[in-house]
């Protein structure tokens, strides 16, 4: 985790974006504030239509905010046209210039910045090496594959050495295998160039594996910002917990809360303690989440925190998923890693099982 | 057939030969498909053209038609005239003026329709799908009325007692009706009106296929509006501009109806001059020579234009 204080590359300050007017208006973003430090791989994650592209387009300058400000390294760029902002975009459909070669595409931004020919040529070659496309520099865009176009789009956007690179679902058009390759490639490019990346995706796994930090968006609002670990382990709202990974939702009664530890009563009547975030003191009836892999099936009834009847056991290769119907009627999923000697567990179907929980498995939601 | 993919033993031919024969057959079938159009072209275009070519080398008949007597007079008279009394030859002012007017007006028509048509096409192409068809529909409405009627309507507007002059008089902008009808300006206005859709439609069709994300990509890579237009939009939609310019320039050079009505006898263009020779002028060989001259002129301009535009496209990239 980063310790040194780094400069803020992008500051999004209280941005609201409304498309259209009157009855047809759409609130695409509402009171969004995000600080993105220099040299970070920052991801905007959310379902389709939540406003990710809109936020990226506001940073690039293709749209203007209805309210709020955007700062680039401390400078207010809200009123700047796109060609005056030192940020570059990798478009979702690549948007490569079809009448130019690979090298001409990459050189375009440098030419527009008025760089001398020699410097431009050097940078183009450097970029071609960076994305491993040296052999195809004189190809026409129509003569290269989708994956290669993706690389050219990246090289073209990186060539002018922008202060921030914006990427709008750049991998969504690639097939699974290529996608995994490009994920690694993107991580490498980010650390090699040191350029701040703002990456948009609706794929939670992609977000978790690639990012330094993630902002989860829904319906134009930022729900939570944090590292992948924080987002996964301590989702603050139901939507975040549900959108990222698998999870069990239950209700619980708070007994008390002190020094960042809350004790609560589970639906089974058993009591557990769990950490809560600073400044959050839940009370009364709350919603809690428990990740399936943070629970386990125990033999000893004394260790049991929840009980139920095993209704289904699904083999997933790396692990087993047990679906257990709790006494309260909800279905609870437990996920247990398989080992070499695992045997079929179908003979236990219909029997009563006891569920144990790892320490801090219970996460209290704010909503 | 044996499942052998290298040699066809039954006919003893290597597969590549078999494929060649097959494609030859396909080729023949293609020609067969083309033949109706080809025959029509031969009969309707080449035949008459040949007749006109032959006529251009004959002698005018006394009242009309031609006498079968070889003469180069038709060709000479395209830009020269023979003095009736002395028989000496001098450049024909009248013909040269008509020629220059034709070229000038066609150029102006092409350039002005381009200047007006380009933003129009851009406007339509950037509307929503539904709106686009509405605008295209509006653009094509003039085609529904006969050209003659539309041209007479323009005449009504611009003539001395017409609406335009009446309006200007009423507003005290002028105190004498201005002569618009039978001037080059009237012809130009009429041609602009007639040819504008022919410029808009091809440009629109190449713009419709244009990916407007490329404009944003241009802005994103530090290109100003003007440079995005010059370096990205123009080169990509160039085929539409070339097509539109040809579609406007070629028929304007040979325009007949518009200059006939709006130019009267005073402002003639090549088309009217040709018609004159086959009618009142009674000089078919000259008419035929002028026709061929017009054809050659058109070809030269087309070649120049295509040469010019493809070269400039290369130097841009
Ligand atoms: N140009 C636009 N005009 C009107 N509404 C728009 C426009 N662009 C986006 N929207 C709306 O704004 C919302 C957010 O869109 P977007 O930012 O594209 O979401 P995402 O990229 O997360 O899928 C959606 O409801 C979308 O329909
Ligand atoms: Mg999007």
Image (cartoon, coloured by chain):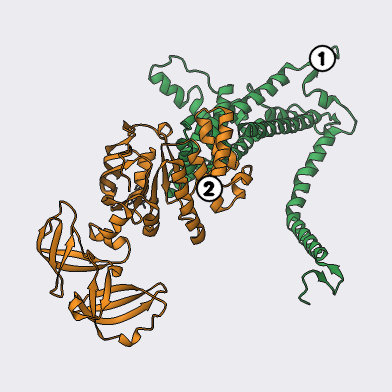
Return the residue at label 1: B83
Q: How many marks?
A: 2
**Residue B240 in view in this figure:** no
Q: Is A270 drawn above or below residue A50 in the view shown? A: below
Residue, disc 2: A151
Measured as percent of width and height from the top left, residue B197 is found at 54, 38
Left-right relation of A199 to A240: right
* Dot 2 beta carbon under 8 Å from ligand 2: no
Picture residue at 76% right of the left edge, 55% below the top: B35
x and y, in percent, of residue A344 in the image: 38, 84
Residue A10 coordinates in the image, percent (x, y):
33, 39
Q: Which chain is green?
A: B
Does B196 sit left or right of A270 as displayed?
right
Instruction: Give how far across and how far down residue B78 sits, in percent.
Output: 78, 24
**Which corner quadrant of the image does residue A35 belong to?**
top left
Residue A74 or residue B165, whichever sits in front: A74
* Most foreground residue, A246 or B87: A246
Element assignment for label 2: helix
Kindly report which numbered mark, 2 or 1, lies closer to the viewer in this rendering.
2
Quarter assignment of residue A234: bottom left
Q: Using the image, name the chain to which the residue with label 2 belongs.
A: A
**Chain shown in orange:** A
Left or right, residue A313 beside residue A223: right
- Quarter of the image for the C terminus of chain A: give it: bottom left
Closer to us: B100 or A322: A322
Q: Nearer the viewer, residue B206 or B156?
A: B206
């Amino acid at each position: 985790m980063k310790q040194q204080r780094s400069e803020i590359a992008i500051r999004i300050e209280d941005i609201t974006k409304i498309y259209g007017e009157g009855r047809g208006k759409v609130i695409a973003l509402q009171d969004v504030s995000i600080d993105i430090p220099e040299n970070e791989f920052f991801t905007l994650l959310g379902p389709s239509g939540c406003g990710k592209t809109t936020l990226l387009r506001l940073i690039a300058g293709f749209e203007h905010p209805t309210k709020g400000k955007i700062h680039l390294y401390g400078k207010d760029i809200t009123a700047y046209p796109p060609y005056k902002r030192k940020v570059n975009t990798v478009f979702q459909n690549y948007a490569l210039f079809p009448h130019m070669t690979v090298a001409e595409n990459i050189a375009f931004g440098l030419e527009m910045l008025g760089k001398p020919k020699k410097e431009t040529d050097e940078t183009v070659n450097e970029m071609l090496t960076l994305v491993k496309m040296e052999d195809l520099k004189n190809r026409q865009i129509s003569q290269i594959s989708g994956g290669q176009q993706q690389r050219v789009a990246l090289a073209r956007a990186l060539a002018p050495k922008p202060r921030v690179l914006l990427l709008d679902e750049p991998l969504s058009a690639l097939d699974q295998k290529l996608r995994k390759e490009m994920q690694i490639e993107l991580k490498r490019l980010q650390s090699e160039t040191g350029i701040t990346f703002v990456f948009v995706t609706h794929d939670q796994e992609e977000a978790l594996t690639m990012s330094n930090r993630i902002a989860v968006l829904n319906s134009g609002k930022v729900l939570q910002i944090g590292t992948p670990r924080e987002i996964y382990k301590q989702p603050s709202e139901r939507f975040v917990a549900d959108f990222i990974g698998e999870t069990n939702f239950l209700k619980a009664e708070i007994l008390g809360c002190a020094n960042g530890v809350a004790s609560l009563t589970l639906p089974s009547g058993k009591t557990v303690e769990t950490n809560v975030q600073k400044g959050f003191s839940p009370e009364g009836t709350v919603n809690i989440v428990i990740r399936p892999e943070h629970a386990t099936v125990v033999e000893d009834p004394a260790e049991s925190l929840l009980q139920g009847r095993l209704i289904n056991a699904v083999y997933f290769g790396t692990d087993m998923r047990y679906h257990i119907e709790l006494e309260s009627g909800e279905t609870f999923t437990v996920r247990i890693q398989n080992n070499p000697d695992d045997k079929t567990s179908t003979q236990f179907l219909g029997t009563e099982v006891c569920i144990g929980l790892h320490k801090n498995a219970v996460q209290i939601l704010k909503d | 057939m044996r499942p052998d993919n290298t040699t066809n033993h039954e006919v003893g031919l290597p597969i590549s030969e078999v494929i060649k024969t097959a494609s030859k057959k396909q080729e023949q079938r293609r020609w067969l498909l083309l033949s109706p159009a080809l025959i029509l072209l031969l009969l309707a275009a080449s035949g008459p053209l040949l007749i006109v070519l032959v006529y251009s080398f004959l002698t005018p008949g006394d009242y009309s038609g031609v006498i079968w007597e070889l003469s180069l007079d038709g060709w000479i008279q395209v830009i020269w005239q023979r003095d009736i009394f002395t028989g000496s030859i001098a450049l024909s002012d009248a013909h040269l003026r008509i020629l220059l007017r034709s070229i000038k007006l066609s150029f102006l028509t092409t350039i002005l329709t381009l200047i007006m048509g380009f933003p129009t096409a851009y406007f339509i192409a950037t509307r929503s799908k539904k709106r686009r068809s509405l605008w295209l529909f509006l653009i094509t409405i003039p085609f529904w009325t006969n050209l003659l009627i539309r041209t007479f309507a323009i005449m009504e507007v611009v003539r001395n007692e017409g609406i335009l002059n009446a309006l200007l008089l009423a507003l005290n902008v002028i105190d004498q009706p201005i002569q618009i009808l039978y001037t080059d300006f009237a012809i130009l206005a009429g041609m602009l009106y007639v040819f504008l859709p022919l410029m808009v439609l091809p440009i629109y069709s190449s713009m419709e296929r244009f990916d407007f994300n490329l404009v944003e990509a241009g802005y994103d890579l530090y290109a100003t509006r003007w440079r995005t237009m010059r370096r990205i939009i123009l080169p990509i939609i160039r085929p539409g501009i070339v097509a539109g310019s040809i579609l406007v320039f070629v028929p304007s050079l040979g325009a007949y109806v518009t200059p006939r009505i709006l130019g009267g006898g005073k402002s003639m263009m090549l088309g009217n001059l040709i018609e004159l020779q086959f009618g009142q002028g009674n000089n078919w060989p000259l008419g035929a020579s002028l026709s061929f001259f017009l054809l050659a002129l058109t070809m030269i301009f087309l070649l120049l234009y295509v040469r010019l535009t493809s070269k400039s496209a290369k130097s841009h990239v």
